[in-house]
Image (cartoon, grey):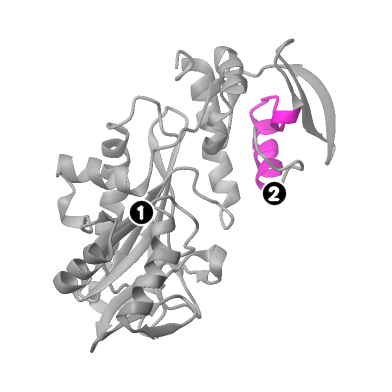
Amino acid sequence: MFRTNKKPRALARTVAYVCNYYNIDFFYFTNDDVDIENETISGLFFEHGVWVRKTTDYPEVIDNEPNLIFQEELYDSLSKKSVLTSYKIGSKQKVFNMLKKDGRFDDILIPSKVIKTVSDIEMDIDKHQHILLKPSKSNQGKNIYTVRKVGTEYEIGTDDSTENYPKEDFIQFCNDVIFKKVYLSQPFISSKTKEGFPFDVRINTRRSRNGEWSTVRIYPKIGIGQTITSNIHQGGGISSINPFLQSQFGDQWKEIKNNLKQLSKSFPPYFQSFYDNPIDALGIDFGIDPSGKLWLFEVNTYPGSRYFRVEDAERRVQYYLYCAEKGVNRSN
């Protein structure tokens, strides 16, 4: 397991336990632990409840963070001997353009475009009345804004507050905040609980023993105390899917649950078809509007598993076995 944290965390310990069951030698390391010249790693092995450092050869399979893949010299060295499990999929806009061009899942796509001027924003407000502005690159729900016109002023909402700006101040806000990064504009989809909290439903899916996709968990993320995002890192909680849908959508809940289950099976292999490198896991986020319609909010590789580490670790390790046997992506 290749990570940036110097000390192994709970996921690494859980994976170590599952690897032990399968008689797999498992160790944890960071980039500072790699000796490229000798092709060895000073790794941490979990033995008798403690991490013990040992020098070892490059392993057959490396469970890596996808954002580390740009350390080119290190990754070139590792990938010659080891299978890497994770790769980046690109920006939100790249993913949207790819899916939009293909068209097979058009019914769940939220129209989205890169904004470059205040006029771009104004045109979208005229078209959709209420819009969402979010960074093109994923950032755990940070720096997201809603915008709409209230009389002659612009109402800007965040998870914490709502403020009205005269046009001159709004232009200044855009120059100081929005145009400093690449931002996307899309119509605001109201995916809120009856209590007014934003939510989305995460489908966490991962490849397992035969390289086939397996749903790890489907669960709602609820932005308790928030107004826009439901990112758990920003505060919030999760729920079991059945009682949540029952409480929010009444007799419609089974239909919505079936739609989510169908997407958990059909969407991952469809999404993989756009990429040459194997994708090991996806976190697919859906909003649900008041009518019960599903909308694709985001597709993430490297999804978190804080609330179901054991189930996640079991599938991870099964995929390690598959990669070791098949040599998946070693040639890449």
Kindly identify the amino acid type of the residue bearing the numbered disc 1: Glu
Q: Name which residue lies at 45% across and 68% down.
A: 230
Residue 122 position (above or below residue 266): below
* Image-quadrant location for residue 254: bottom left
Q: Nearer the viewer, residue 332 or 118?
A: 118
Instruction: Assess disc 2: are there few (<14), some (14-19) or many (≥20) residues with their C-alpha within 10 Å of its C-alpha.
Output: few
**Mark 2 element type:** helix
Question: Residue 32 placed where, x, y %?
Answer: 75, 29
How far apart marks 2 and 1 lie (CA) works out to 26 Å
Left or right for 199, reference 325: left
Q: Nearer the viewer, residue 48 or 279?
A: 279
Give the number of the mark in front: 2 or 1: 1
Residue at the bottom extreme, as displayed? 151
Residue 305 visible in the snapshot: yes
Instruction: Assess disc 1: are there few (<14), some (14-19) or many (≥20) residues with their C-alpha within 10 Å of its C-alpha.
Output: some
Of the 4 image quadrants, the one containing the N terminus is top right
Q: Name which residue lies at 42% across and 54% down.
A: 181
**Reading the chain from its start, which is encountered first: label 2 or label 1?**
2
| Residue beneath disc 2 | 10
Residue 298 is labelled as 1
Q: Name which residue lies at 47% across and 62% down.
A: 141
What range of the chain is rendered magenta?
10-32
